[in-house]
Structures are given as structure tokens and as C-alpha cells.
Image (cartoon, helix red, strand yellow):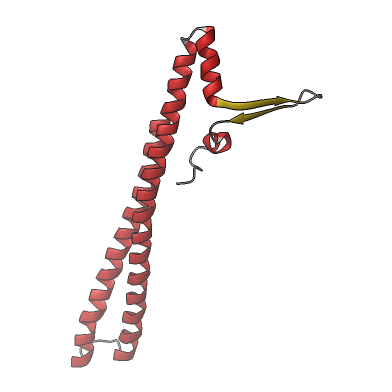
Amino acid sequence: MHLSLALRVKLNYLCYSAKLYLLAIDERGVLTLLKSEVVKSIRGESSFSTEMLSDLIREAESECARLEEQCADARRDVKDTENLLRQLSDHFDELISWAELYDSASLEKKKMVVNALINRIEVSRDYKVKIDFNFDFEQFTQGLDIAA
């Protein structure tokens, strides 16, 4: 189950990165067309003025730069997500191995497993129970919110 979640998250980031890359390529194509239109404008063969083309080229260059920056950010996000998923998988595998060990263990071994997972248990007078785990239980239950 956790593997399919990891694949879906990675696939979503890769798809997002690919879409940005395709948009950047498309915008570069527009920029190339506009630059070729400048030559026609200088020759008097274009219906666009050089000022208009200059403005359009400036806008296209700005959009290309923005999209390329977003692509770089998306690539970093993919790498960060891969590291995060690897870390989560390690934690998950460790917890599963503890669960498998616990299921097949004797009572004495079960006590040792609980001792390794739980640092302290406090029970108050009104039967409120506070468990201090040896790992960050909230981050584990939230899944991908583990700090990298």
C-alpha cells in the first residue's frame, strides 16, 4: 500500500514537471517565431511593428525565464519527494518488521518490543493515558509530513 502511494506521489510530481517543461518548450517556440518576424518587420514584410514585436519578445522571454525557474523548482521538488518517500518507507518497513516480530513473539519478547517502541506511559487519576514513543508518532501517522 505504501509503495503505491509513493509511486502516485512521485508520478504526480513528474507529470507536473513534464507539463512545465512542455510549456517552456512551447513558449520558446513562440519566442523563435517572434524573432523571425522581426526580420520580416525590418524588410517591411510584416504586419507587426518593430515596437510591438519588441514588447512581445520581452514578454515571451520573461515567460520563458519564469517557466524555466518553475521547471528547476519542480525538479528539486521531485528529488526532495524521492528522499522523503525513501525516509518514510524506511520508517514504515521498520514499524512493519516490529509488528511481524511482535505477532510471532513470546510474552517476554513482546515486552521487549514494547520497551523498544515506547519510552514511557503515564496514567493519571482520571485514567488519562499519555504514551511517550521512541519515535515521532504524529509525524508517522501524518505520513508524508516527515521533516527531511
Q: Quadrant of residue 129?
A: top right
Of the pair 142 and 8, the residue shown nearer to us: 142
Q: Which quarter shows the N terminus?
A: top left
Name the residue: 40% across, 46% down: 81
Of the pair 77 and 147, the residue shown nearer to us: 147
- Asked if 86 appears above or below 110 in the picture, the reply is below
- Count how many numbered circles sit on residues in the image: 0
Residue 116, position in %: x, y?
A: 52, 24
Taking the image as drawn, is residue 44 in sight? Answer: no
Of the pair 47 and 38, the residue shown nearer to us: 38
Residue 19, position in %: x, y?
A: 34, 55
Residue 109, position in %: x, y?
A: 50, 12
Q: Quadrant of residue 134?
A: top right
Name the residue: 49% across, 46% down: 147
- Asked if 124 appears above or below 136 in the picture, the reply is above
| 126 to the left or right of 116 | right
Residue 56, position in %: x, y?
A: 34, 81
